[in-house]
Image (spheres, helix red, strand yellow):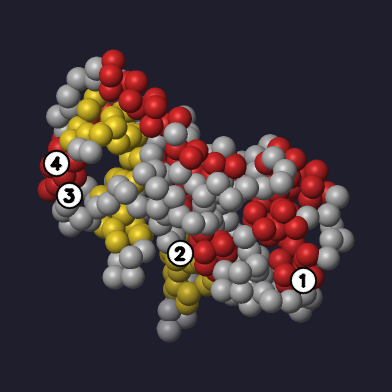
Amino acid sequence: MKNGIITRDGLTRFVDSIIKDGIPVYGVVENANGRFNYEELRGGREFRLDFDVTLTPPKRFFTPEREEFLRYKISPEIKTEPVFDTRKRVVLGVHPYDMVAINQMDVIWKDKNEDTHYLTRRRNTIIIGVDPERASRWSFWHVMGTYTVESGYDIWLTKISQDRYFVEVASKEGEGLISKYAKLEAVTPEDEARRNEVRKGLCNLCDPSRKMKVSPEALPRLAKESWDHPTWEERAKKCLSCGSCNIVCPTCYCFDVTEDLDINLKGGRRVRLWDGCQLEDFALVAHGENFRAKRVDRFKHRFYRKALYQYERYNQIACVGCGRCSSACLPDIADPVGIVNSL
């Protein structure tokens, strides 16, 4: 697989050609409020690569907010039909920390009972990542070590000058896309050197004041030693139990399942919906017991799941430093940096 150089106009033509061939391309666009999010592109001039962070993470392409995954008929006899999303798609503009999160999700959704719906979407999605050009005020991916990533993507872009991008081709799928729809210039030693220089400097894009008083490696031990710390009660008193921090987190994957029956009761569909541990009824079970009825228990659980439980099971800290939870939290209590430093 051969790397190359492409101009911004070349990227525009590249995306236009893919769309013209009937393959959906989802890129980052700016809304009326100056915020960024993924949308299906109509053309190659719509997408932005200079965004700070998207409102929602790219996990939605692999675990949608609402997902129908089984249809059934009840009469005269029960018949079921699994539903899979097998459409090909391209997701353009995934930052390194979000790619780290996707790689974590790959491990989780393959663990023990594989989730074939997630894995089908993952196989049929070509990821084109891009190195950040700037960071949001809440970002702390320089602390978490997630400002670069080495696997999981098909193509990776790094801006090396005003109008030129270094293109790393990392998979056969990416190579096929490039060879069919793009024309790359040859890479020079100067291009290689500039790309390495840009990547080394990515950790300097975040606000230097966004620092934790301990290293990420120390978080599991910190969690174990902090169960009774007063910051949990202090912060939980302000919590709205809205679940916004769960929804925007790239490593949150909890879901609920509902039965959507037809009005004639002769059939229906099974639907999976996003759920979150901060919602009041998340731990409510059939006979009425709620294992986390108190806000403080729910608030604490979110941190422990990120800093300790996932680490014990997968040897990974389930926070990539994107800062979305901090940005989305109205009472300003969800910031992991603030929590860690309080502990």
**Marks 4 and 1, the one that precedes in the sequence:** 4
**Residue placed furthest toward the front:** 209
Residue at mark 4: 9
Residue linked to disc 1: 234
The first of marks 4 and 2 along the sequence is: 4
Q: Secondary structure at mark 2?
A: loop
N-term-proximal mark, 1 vs 3: 3
Distance between the alpha carbons at the discs numbered 3 and 4? 9 Å
Residue 154 picture location, percent across and down? 35, 34
Badge 1 local density, few (<14 within 10 Å), some, or many (20+)?
few
Amino acid beneath label 2: Glu
Pick out the residue farthest to the bottom: 263
Amino acid type at circle 1 is Glu
Dot in front, 4 or 2: 4
- Give the mark nearest the N terminus, 3 or 4: 4
Mark 4–mark 2 CB contact (< 8 Å): no
Query: What is the C-alpha distance between the residues marked 1 and 3?
Result: 48 Å
Residue at figure coordinates x 18%, y 27% from the top left: 184
Residue at horizontal 14 percent and vertical 41 percent from the top: 9
Q: Earlier in the sequence, mark 3 or mark 2?
A: 3
Separation of residues labelled 4 and 1 (CA atoms): 52 Å
Report whether 277 appears left or right of 89: right
